[in-house]
Image (cartoon, rainbow, N blue to C red):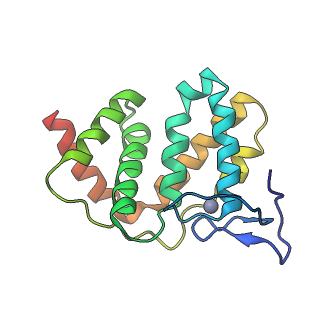
Amino acid sequence: MPAITSDTSAETCPDCRVQLAPVVSTKHPYFGCSASCWALYTEILAREYSSLALMKSVHRLTVDAYAAQHPGKTERRTIQSVWVHLAGLYLILERGLANDFATRVIGALTKEAEPLIWLTPPERLGSVTVIDVVEASGAMEHEEAVRRWAHDVWEAWKPHHKRVQARVSRILTLN
Ligand SMILES: [Zn+2]
């Protein structure tokens, strides 16, 4: 795993701002993440894929938190990604919906005729990052760290809460 560091050779993630030793690896095609941040995220995913309990409890939140914390620059894919993952955070954290129901609502959101518009990301995208989740030991701590992370990222997007709530709530009443 990339070393967690604050030395001057560290690579800063453009979106979540974690500082990590640079790694040579691939990164996501459109998320605004550094390769080292992406590498830690893939470790988190690997941990979840090997635990049925984590897949059921927080995997969906992990994916939503990471994507919403790394919106990248405006283009067709990022516009949709930000909406989809903010909708996921809203449905699970605020509406308390089950993961698969949230997934169905999000599917409906992407099929609507009304285009999605770019939600300009806030200056700071939260203070909880992949590091907090990677450092958790055991499934219970992992789950707690993901929930803290997801709440933190959702809170960071507060300027757009009303817009997300309105559009997603409309889909809930239509479906
Ligand atoms: Zn990052």
Q: Which quarter of the rendered picture does the C terminus lie within?
A: top left
Residue ID at (67%, 62%):
35
Residue 146: x percent and y percent? 61, 42
Residue 62: x percent and y percent? 55, 42
**Residue furthest top in the image:** 52
Residue 121, located in which quarter of the rendered image? bottom left
Q: How many marks?
A: 0
Q: Quadrant of ligand 1?
A: bottom right
Left or right position of 129 against 151:
right
Q: Name the residue nearer the viewer: 144 or 3.
A: 3
Q: Name the residue nearer the viewer: 17 or 92.
A: 17
Left or right position of 25 against 168:
right
- Is 94 above or below relative to 32? above
Left or right position of 23 against 161:
right
Residue 128, located in which quarter of the rendered image? bottom right
Residue 168: x percent and y percent? 25, 46
Residue ID at (48%, 46%):
64
Q: Name the residue nearer the viewer: 121 or 51.
A: 51
Residue ID at (38%, 71%):
74
- Is 151 above or below relative to 126? above
Residue ID at (35%, 37%):
95
**Residue furthest bottom in the image:** 8
Residue 162, located in which quarter of the rendered image? bottom left
